[in-house]
Amino acid sequence: MSVTESGFSDSVLALLPELGLPVLAGTVMLASLGVPMLPGSLMVLVAGTLAAAGELPVLATMITVLCAALLGDQLGFLLGRLFGSQLARREDPTLRRALSLLETRGPMAVFLTRWLIAPLGPAMNVVAGAGGLVWPRFLLADLAGEIVWTLGYMALGASFAPFIPQIAELSSDITLLLAALAVALAAGVLLRRHRPHGPR
């Protein structure tokens, strides 16, 4: 991620405590749709922390994340359905990886790319819509995967909540520290996932 992209992500994260659920919904939906530079997963981590600390309503936050992610995924599927022939001619390695995974795993590929292989999620939406999967099967796999993603990331973010009072004593800018914790956690997960050898 470039300095510009990092600054943009930090700016979006900083809006969450101020604007609440609307900025959360917009960010998650656009990130699910594949818009670059939007920190969807990090936003959900921070939302989980804020919800556990009482800064955001827990149930409304969960429903917002889930519905926004589903909406972005369904729009991606629709784009694939409408423009699949043009997209099939593109030499895009991400689309080809998503298509290969879909051909070998079927609906399970959609489920896994919601949370376990999340970087392939937007591309998977498009290739599934381009003819790789019928919509009802896509919807069911998408719903199951996004439930796992929503609950998992919010629970992970909530684990930071007990440390907020100590953090507040050290800094007046809690949002940036929460974002830094989320970035560090996400980086650690990615490093472990891409480690060439050894246990995960």
Image (cartoon, rainbow, N blue to C red):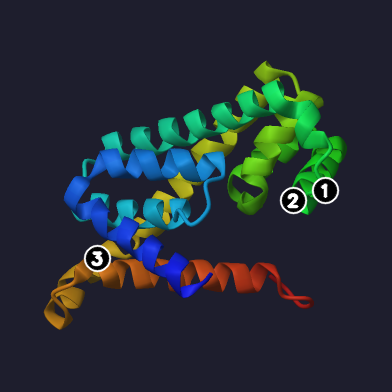
Q: Which mark is residue 14?
A: none
Q: At which x and y percent is residue 7?
A: 38, 68
Q: Which residue corresponds to mark 2?
A: 94
Q: Which residue corresponds to mark 3?
A: 175
Of badges 3 and 1, the one in the foreground is 1
Rendered residue at 78%/76% (across/down): 196
Q: At which x and y percent is residue 167?
A: 20, 76
Q: Assess disc 3: are there few (<14), some (14-19) or many (≥20) residues with their C-alpha within 10 Å of its C-alpha.
A: some
Amino acid beneath label 2:
Thr
Secondary structure under tag 3 reads helix
Q: Is residue 123 left or right of residue 55?
A: right
Q: Which residue corresponds to mark 1?
A: 91
- State the CA–CA distance, disc 2 to disc 3: 33 Å
State which tag comes first along the sequence, 2 or 3.
2
- Please tell me whether residue 158 is drawn above or below residue 123 in the rendered image: below
Rendered residue at 37%/71% (across/down): 181
Amino acid beneath label 1:
Glu
Q: Assess disc 2: are there few (<14), some (14-19) or many (≥20) residues with their C-alpha within 10 Å of its C-alpha.
A: some
Amino acid beneath label 3:
Thr
